[in-house]
Amino acid sequence: MNPRILTLTVASAALLAVAACNKPAETAPAADATATDTAAMAPATTDPVVGGASMSPSDTIVTNAAKASNLTTLVSAVQAAGLAETLSGPGPFTVFAPDNAAFEKIPAATRESLMAPAGKADLTGILTYHVVPGRLTAADLAAQATAAGGTAELTTVQGGKLKVMVNADGSVTLTDAAGGTSKVTEADVLQSNGVVHVIDTVVMPG
């Protein structure tokens, strides 16, 4: 072979090799920013917390109440009155649930009397006065109150009437047959068989 041609061939091969080494690396396709942003923006679904415990909407009123550290007195009262099975049933029920502090407002001697076997009938009457048939959220209560001119009257499972008023700040106040009032402190705790509204005072049927 002609020495000049051989030299040109070797030089060309060397240039091609250098060009191949200097070729920029292919850039990997960028991640789908839209998908990432959508995932980041998706709202976290969390169950409401009562008494430091998560209230699952798939559990019953009794099961959820038993988890809450601030509803232990109510749970004990429900058991003493023999209402646990009823409130674990399909319902639905709307329960105005007094917290432990609400029961503390009742004199100790009265509480002990109600929790005794001899007080079961009276205890049952008080507890069922806190239960209304159906699932009534805060929005439902507000709608009923508005339709009734500001105060709705609910018929409880006990048979007595319980008045509900929605205040200007959106809070809900109950007025019992004896004229006592109680404020809803935690509303719309959904249950598999109804809804619970935690209240700060035990309401009395009269």
Image (tube, helix red, strand yellow):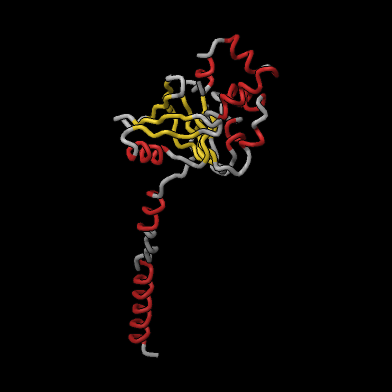
Residue 183 occupies which quadrant of the picture?
A: top left
Return the x and y of residue 57 as percentages of the image width and height: 54, 42
Q: Is residue 119 left or right of residue 15?
A: right
Is 114 or 50 nearer to us in this picture? Answer: 114
Is 168 or 25 nearer to us in this picture? Answer: 168
State the residue lying farthest toward the bottom.
1
Is 146 or 4 nearer to us in this picture? Answer: 146
Q: Is residue 190 above or below residue 80?
A: below
Number of marks drawn: 0
Residue at (55%, 42%) from the top-left corner? Answer: 92
Q: Is residue 117 above or below residue 107?
A: below
Return the x and y of residue 56 as percentages of the image width and height: 55, 40
Return the x and y of residue 44 as percentages of the image width and height: 44, 44
Residue at (69%, 17%) from the top-left corner? Answer: 118
Q: Is residue 144 left or right of residue 120?
A: left
Image quadrant in which the N terminus is located: bottom left
State the residue lying farthest toward the right.
117
Residue at (33%, 40%) from the top-left corner? Answer: 147
Return the x and y of residue 137 as percentages of the image width and height: 44, 39
Residue 35 occupies which quadrant of the picture?
A: bottom left
